[in-house]
Amino acid sequence: MEQARVVEKKPKVVFVLGATATGKSKLAIALAKRFDGEVINADKIQLHAGAPIITNKVTEEEQDGVRHHLLGVLPPDADFTAEDFRREAAAAVSRVVAAGRLPVVAGGSNTYIEALVEGDGAAFRAAHDVLFLWIDSAPALLAWYTAERVDDMVARGLVDEARASFDAGAGADYSRGVRRAIGLPEMHAYLAAERGGAPARRSSRRCWRAPCARSRTTPSPWSARSKLDGWDVRRVDATALFARMAKAGGACDQQTWEALVWEPCEKMVRRFLETPVAPIAVYGNGTSSAAAGGDGEPTVPASGGHCD
């Protein structure tokens, strides 16, 4: 029988999951600030450079001094598969761990997250102690907030940014790179009509609102993951906060966000980090095994919420 050598304990990694517009970046940055971490982007569109408004990349100011990995690092038209992401994200996690810091993966693309966690024979999950925070909300309220956010993006120059992309990429492939961003393919018809002098059938806002609304009603895989695959998924229900925002006409103050989102998430992460995990037993062939970590808490905590 091959003898194993026991090495250091599993490094801990926090994932922040959820649909677009649920505030994953805000929460990930706050957690990284609180627990001395760095953020690893897992949004397949935000991996690409360019179109900061369309892709809703966090600005340097919003990053608040937190180091980000895999954000705007690819050319706009580059191909990047889920396997490419698995390899690069795993390397980024290793660099953050080697620096003695907490990796916080800000999820957005389900296929990328699944490739990282379950790809290569689930090697990542076997070698790391992982906590998943899943920000969820009632679809109707999320659709309302998405429409509000589209209006804000238009006011910040979304249409001009889309027009520049359209002008620079006549005949471009909208299945590649940054042009896969939600709403951008639909915007092509609007811009083509504008360029030809013909009246567009839709306004610029409607071009973005329709596909964005559809994306919010897509069922989330994370609940099933927690039940079927043993993922430690903690659901944070953001419905209450979106409801408050709707009553306030879209406004959300920091104090409300902290009470409904930050405090429950901070508590869960703190307890996760304080929970001991078993060392990894490494064999000569490179395989490893370890007892699973976890604090035995339910996968559905008290409700939380979100605002951007």
Image: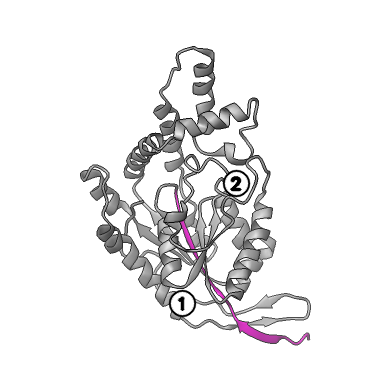
Q: Position of residue 73 (x, y in %)?
A: 62, 51
Residue 170, visible in the rendered structure:
yes
Residue 296, visible in the rendered structure:
no
Residue at the (67%, 48%) spot, across then down: 80
Most extreme residue toward the top is 198
In the depicted structure, whether residue 135 falls above or below residue 127 = above
**In front of the other: 156 or 175:** 156
Q: Residues within 10 Å of mark 2 (few under 14, many from 20)?
A: many
Extent of the magenta region? 1-19
Residue at the (47%, 41%) spot, across then down: 53
Q: Amino acid at mark 2?
A: His
Q: Position of residue 37 (x, y in %)?
A: 49, 69
Cα separation, mark 1 vs mark 2, equals 32 Å
Instruction: Tell me the SS state at disc 2.
Output: loop
Instruction: Give yes or no for residue 9 being in the magenta stretch.
Output: yes
Looking at the image, is mark 1 or mark 2 earlier in the sequence? 2
Kindly identify which numbered label has been placed on residue 132.
none
Magenta: main secondary structure equals: strand
Q: Is residue 282 left or right of residue 30?
A: right
Kindly identify which numbered label has been placed on residue 48.
2
Q: Amino acid at mark 1?
A: Leu
In the depicted structure, whether residue 158 falls above or below residue 69 = above
Q: Position of residue 35 (x, y in %)?
A: 44, 73
The quadrant holding residue 115 is bottom right
In the depicted structure, whether residue 183 falls above or below residue 195 = below
Residue at image mark 1:
273
